[in-house]
Image (tube, rainbow, N blue to C red):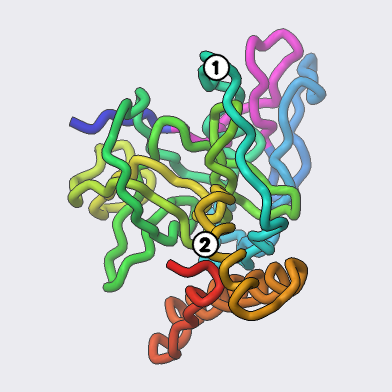
Amino acid sequence: MIRISLLLPLVALATACSRTDDAALLCTLDENGRIITESGRYTAACVEPTAIPRGATQEPSGRLTILEAPLPAPFTGLDKKWPPDPVEAEPQIARPAMPTELSYYIRAFPQEKTPAGDVLSISTEHVIVLRDGCFFADLKGNDDPLVMFPFGAALTVDNQGYLAFGSRYEPNRMGTVRVGLRAETGMVSQLFDPSHEVVQLCGKHKMIAFTMVSDPFSSPERFNPGLRRYGERSGATDAQVLQRANACAMKRAQRDADRRLRDPDLDPIDCNRFWGF
């Protein structure tokens, strides 16, 4: 049985929070974007919504829609490897699944209540999009399912200002992947009915659960052997290999978005000649 916890927006607060509150709360804004205050209350103790992430559209509801995002250059070096884990190191929860300052824009972030434990290592990839504050897996057809996220997933804003999926844990071995890009999703559940709370927030849709949501390019050792072989075959320098592989990966991501959103008859772009899958 799938267990969920909903990280619900805090925009229904009647007043800005006080300095004595145990946890920082989201400030309440009026229709002009000004913080609503009340005599005797302190606005400094509440958290203002973060700036709207790049590439997002704000709906009349105040929630965000993100259907696509540009892929940042995924390759930075042909010898890059993950550092060895410290002896007996255990990942530690280091951040919330959804920061308070993002909750103004998100209706719900359905998530497993506990870690999944050991699961089969299965590689699947899906594009997860945000529509009016709800996360959907962008599948073929007209009724995409809502997404149930794994316990370790977290929302973040990356260093270029895009909304992205990251990890609640440190050390983070999953990387970050932007909303609207293809993510590695591990094992995939059958479609099931979401809880009443999710239906109330996001409408009546089926739901699908993933065991991971991570950057497909997060493991250098997965790609670098193929990139080095391409360099040996082509005679390209390391800098040329990286430039060509990055250019192809970014063009492929844009073509995938164009095929999903604008013209499904466009030909896909194949970059396997660079990393040799």
Task: Please tell me in which quadrant of the rendered image residue 170 appears.
Answer: top right
Under circle 1, the secondary element is loop
**Location of residue 277 in the rendering, given as x and y in whole percent from the top left corner:** 43, 67
- At 31% across and 62% down in the image, what residue appears? 144
- Three-letter code for the amino acid on which mark 1 is drawn: Ala
- Mark linked to residue 46: none
In depth, the one of 274 and 217 nearer the eye is: 274
Q: Nearer the viewer, residue 9 or 18?
A: 9
The vertical placement of 133 against 241, above or below, is above
Picture coordinates of residue 149, whole percent (x, y): 39, 40
Looking at the image, which residue is at 76% across and 20% down? 45
Region of the chain picked out in magenta, as a range: 7-28
- Whether 26 is among the magenta residues is yes
Q: Is residue 247 above or below residue 201?
A: below
Q: Amino acid at mark 2?
A: Gly
Which secondary structure type mostly characterizes the magenta part of the structure? loop
Answer with left or right where residue 239 lies relative to residue 194.
right
- Most foreground residue, 12 or 240: 240
> What residue lies at 57% left-to-right and 38% top-to-bottom?
103
Check if residue 58 falls in the magenta segment. Answer: no
Question: In which quadrant of the rendered image does the N terminus lie?
Answer: top left
Residue at mark 1 to residue at mark 2: CA–CA distance: 33 Å
- The quarter of the picture where residue 112 lies is top left
- Pointer 2: what residue? 180
Left or right of 110? Residue 34 is right
Decide: few, some or many residues near mark 2? Use Cα within 10 Å; few <14, some 14-19, many ≥20: many
Label 1 vs label 2, nearer the camera: 1
Write down the residue under mark 1.
Answer: 89
Callout 2: SS: loop
